[in-house]
């Protein structure tokens, strides 16, 4: 399994690594800062710097063994030094949106008993779908929902990732927010993300370190996707990007 620098430090933009496998125009590295995508989060954008040349990474994927493949369109020599470097503005935007949707899905669950049925992160707009069956949720509640989310964002709560055992995870069903998909168990452990003492949920994505960095959020579109399934589109106010990790 490829070591993932972003799990310990999502603000890390580049790292030193070496090529350990290469095939079909893609390479596996000894470690990487690239998130391969999943759970509604797109893969990172960026480049591999090899022998002084920046090779654009056009796609990133994780295979069944947990290896992360970076597609650059040509074979690389095993053992060559490589510096994976992410496109920081894109990553940081996804970090803000991913943290936002943690707050959104927690409010949805606590206020309406709703569980996620789908999500898609974007750097400018993200969507999240919920099963609101039996909750009475309707368009008239959108403004109230938005206000409750922004109240949490304004609280400047710390956000952090950690790992718990599979046994601890199985004993805490509240950590799962999706209706149909369970988070992966890797080597007997599950990664969780906490927002202060306010929330904890299983997640393998990248997030900012404080709700302060998320900023103000608003619902820009509300769609009915069936009798009970509703889709909410969220946007964030522009925020200053940190020039260095907090």
Image (cartoon, helix red, strand yellow):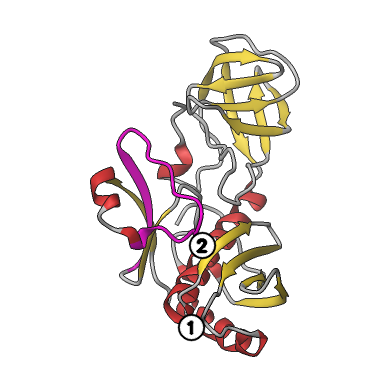
Would you say residue 70 sits in the magenta stretch?
A: no
Q: CA distance from mark 1 to mark 2?
A: 14 Å
Pick whichever, 226 or 114, lies toward us: 226
Residue at 39% over, 71% down: 157
| Residue 194 seen by the camera | no
Residue at 55% over, 27% down: 63
Which residue position holds label 2? 99
Q: How far across and how far down the image is residue 105, in percent?
A: 50, 68
Q: Is residue 116 left or right of residue 8?
A: right
Per the rendered image, the range of residues in magenta is: 174-196
Q: Is residue 186 above or below residue 168?
A: above
Would you say residue 188 sits in the magenta stretch?
A: yes
Pick whichever, 232 or 213, lies toward us: 232
Q: Is residue 122 above or below residue 199?
A: above
Q: How far across and how far down the image is residue 205, in percent?
A: 50, 49
> Neighbour class for label 2 at 10 Å: few (<14), some, many (≥20)?
many
């Amino acid at each position: 399994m490829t070591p993932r620098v972003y799990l310990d430090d999502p603000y890390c933009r580049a790292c030193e690594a070496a090529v350990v496998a290469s095939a079909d125009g893609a390479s596996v590295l000894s470690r990487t800062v690239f998130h391969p995508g999943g759970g509604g989060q797109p893969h990172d954008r960026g480049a591999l710097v090899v022998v002084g040349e920046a090779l654009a990474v056009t796609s990133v994927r994780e295979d069944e063994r947990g290896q992360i493949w970076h597609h650059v369109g040509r074979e690389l020599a095993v053992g060559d030094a490589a510096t994976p470097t992410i496109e920081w503005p894109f990553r940081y935007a996804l970090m803000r949106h991913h943290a936002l949707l943690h707050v959104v899905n927690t409010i949805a669950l606590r206020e309406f008993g709703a569980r996620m049925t789908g999500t898609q992160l974007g750097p400018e707009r993200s969507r999240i779908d919920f099963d609101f069956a039996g909750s009475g949720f309707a368009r008239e509640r959108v403004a109230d929902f938005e206000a409750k989310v922004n109240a949490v964002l304004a609280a400047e709560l710390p956000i952090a990732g950690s790992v718990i055992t599979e046994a601890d995870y199985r004993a805490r069903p509240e950590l799962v927010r999706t209706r149909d998909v369970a988070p992966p168990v890797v080597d007997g452990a599950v990664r969780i993300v906490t927002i202060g003492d306010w929330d904890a949920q299983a997640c393998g994505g990248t997030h900012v370190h404080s709700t302060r960095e998320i900023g103000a959020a608003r619902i820009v579109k509300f769609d009915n996707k069936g009798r009970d399934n509703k889709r909410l589109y969220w946007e964030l106010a522009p925020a200053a990007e940190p020039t260095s990790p907090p």
